[in-house]
Image (cartoon, grey):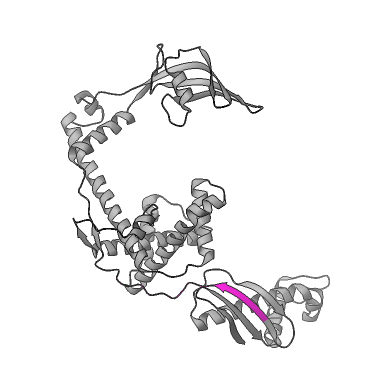
């Protein structure tokens, strides 16, 4: 086999390969023998059909299968010799029969890049939230968690929940929704509707114009949220000795959460510094895959506006993950299968023959990135003095790098 590289960009290659016809003939023979072991024809037992008959009857199929193998073998041989890491499947551009057989392939590869200056990164550690603030937020969340919704007979006020039928007419169209529950003051509702609902009573009907659309509102029920008093009786219901015991344990948990938040913010700062220091082209195939994942995560369509919003985010994430992989290689940070299985058991994930390798590879990638980030965090210079962002860093400081 001979080959030449007709396009040699950092991430995109086009290869022209010449393979003797004898290589294809050899593969056709192997495909014939494989089929011969399985096939049964009239007058012949399985494994005893003459090779010449099989070649004659299945000539085209055998050649296609052999050609697929020839292309794959040739492609892999070039990758191994050049030590390229593919980012995509090879795209077959051209096949020319003859002596020799000529193939033209296009592939994207992971670029060769160097990562440095990833140790002793200086980052700013913010101060923890005051205990008073944490406890106030925690108590508020606890009240919401144990709140009750109950029906009232009075006129509706802000933050009440109203169950109603809504009919909207405008521009020649009409839509109707029944038994919809809305909260008065919800910013998802038009301001005109929120104002109309204040003071309304059960069984009332009202109309309001929102732009050129008419909203008809039929009120079925008004409910208010009742928040519990945080006292000894409440604490005992949650198996605490008294309200002070509840607050102390709640505050302890909130401090741990806040410390974890601070650590995550530090790791995000480290991530942004590393990205700013390490630049290289990213294969379009990988960016497209990450971009599609973002759209799926947020249930968004592919559009020019979304591509403008998320394409560079996807590219940064791919670049960052490749950088982490390079650091893991340099620092010999490996994830053992036992670590993956511990995580699988902890999360209660069920493995079977169909999903085992896919899940293990996926979780291995996650745990590897976490291990590298922990390594970078432990080797960072954490100071109380905030580092001043460059204008470029500040402009890009809008989306998380890690995900």
Q: Is residue 237 above or below residue 40?
A: above
How far from the left and from the top, in percent, is residue 110? 48, 72
How far from the left and from the top, in percent, is residue 388? 26, 58
Does the stretch in magenta take in 393? no
Q: Is residue 2 above or below residue 310?
A: below
How far from the left and from the top, in percent, is residue 236? 22, 27
Q: Residue at x 51, y 20 (%)?
A: 164
325 or 73, nearer to the observer:
325
| Residues rendered magenta in the picture | 103-117
Residue reaching furthest to the left: 244
Q: Is residue 9 above or below residue 271?
A: below
Residue reaching furthest to the right: 43
Q: Quadrant of residue 114?
A: bottom left
Magenta stretch: helix, strand or loop mostly: loop
Q: Residue at x 53, y 50 (%)?
A: 305
Does the stretch in magenta take in 114? yes
Q: Is residue 130 left or right of residue 328?
A: left
62 or 136, nearer to the observer:
136
Q: Residue at x 49, y 60 (%)?
A: 358
How far from the left and from the top, in percent, is residue 235? 22, 28
Quarter that holds the N terminus: bottom right
Residue 313 visible in the current orientation: yes
84 or 302, nearer to the observer:
302
Q: Residue at x 19, y 25 (%)?
A: 232
Q: Is residue 297 left or right of residue 226?
A: right
């Amino acid at each position: 086999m001979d080959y030449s590289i007709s396009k040699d960009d950092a991430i995109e290659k086009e290869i022209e390969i010449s393979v003797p016809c004898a290589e294809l003939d050899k593969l056709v023979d192997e495909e014939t023998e494989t089929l011969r072991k399985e096939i049964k024809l009239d007058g012949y037992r399985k494994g005893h059909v003459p090779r010449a008959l099989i070649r004659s009857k299945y000539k085209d199929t055998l050649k296609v299968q052999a050609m697929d193998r020839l292309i794959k073998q040739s492609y892999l041989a070039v990758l191994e010799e050049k030590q390229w890491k593919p980012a995509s499947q090879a795209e077959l551009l051209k096949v020319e029969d003859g002596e020799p057989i000529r193939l033209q392939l296009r592939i994207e590869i992971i670029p060769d890049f160097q990562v440095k200056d990833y140790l002793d990164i200086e980052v700013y550690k913010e101060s923890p939230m005051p205990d008073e603030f944490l406890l106030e937020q925690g108590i508020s969340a606890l009240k919401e968690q144990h709140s009750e919704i109950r029906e009232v007979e009075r006129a509706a006020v802000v933050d009440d929940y109203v169950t109603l039928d809504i009919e909207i007419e405008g521009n020649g169209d009409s839509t109707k929704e029944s038994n919809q529950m809305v909260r008065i003051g919800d910013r998802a509702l038009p301001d005109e509707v929120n104002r109309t609902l204040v003071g309304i009573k059960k069984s009332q009907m009202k109309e309001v114009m929102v732009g050129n659309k008419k909203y008809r509102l039929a009120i079925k029920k008004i409910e208010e949220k009742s928040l519990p008093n945080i006292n000894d009786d409440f604490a005992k219901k949650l198996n605490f000795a008294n309200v002070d015991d509840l607050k102390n344990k709640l505050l302890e948990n909130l401090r741990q959460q806040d410390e974890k938040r601070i650590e995550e913010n530090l790791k995000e700062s480290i991530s942004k510094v590393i990205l700013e220091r390490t630049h290289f082209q990213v294969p379009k195939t990988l960016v497209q895959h990450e971009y599609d994942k973002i759209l799926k995560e947020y249930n968004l369509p592919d559009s020019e506006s979304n591509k403008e919003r998320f394409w560079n985010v996807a590219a940064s994430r791919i670049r960052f993950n490749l950088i982490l992989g390079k650091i893991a290689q340099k620092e010999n940070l490996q994830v053992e299968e036992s670590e993956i299985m511990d995580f699988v058991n902890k999360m209660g994930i069920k493995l079977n023959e169909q999903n085992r390798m896919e899940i293990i590879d996926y979780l291995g990638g996650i745990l590897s990135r976490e291990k590298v980030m922990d390594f970078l965090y432990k080797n960072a210079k954490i100071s109380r003095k905030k580092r001043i962002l460059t204008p470029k860093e500040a402009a890009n400081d809008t989306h998380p790098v890690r995900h």
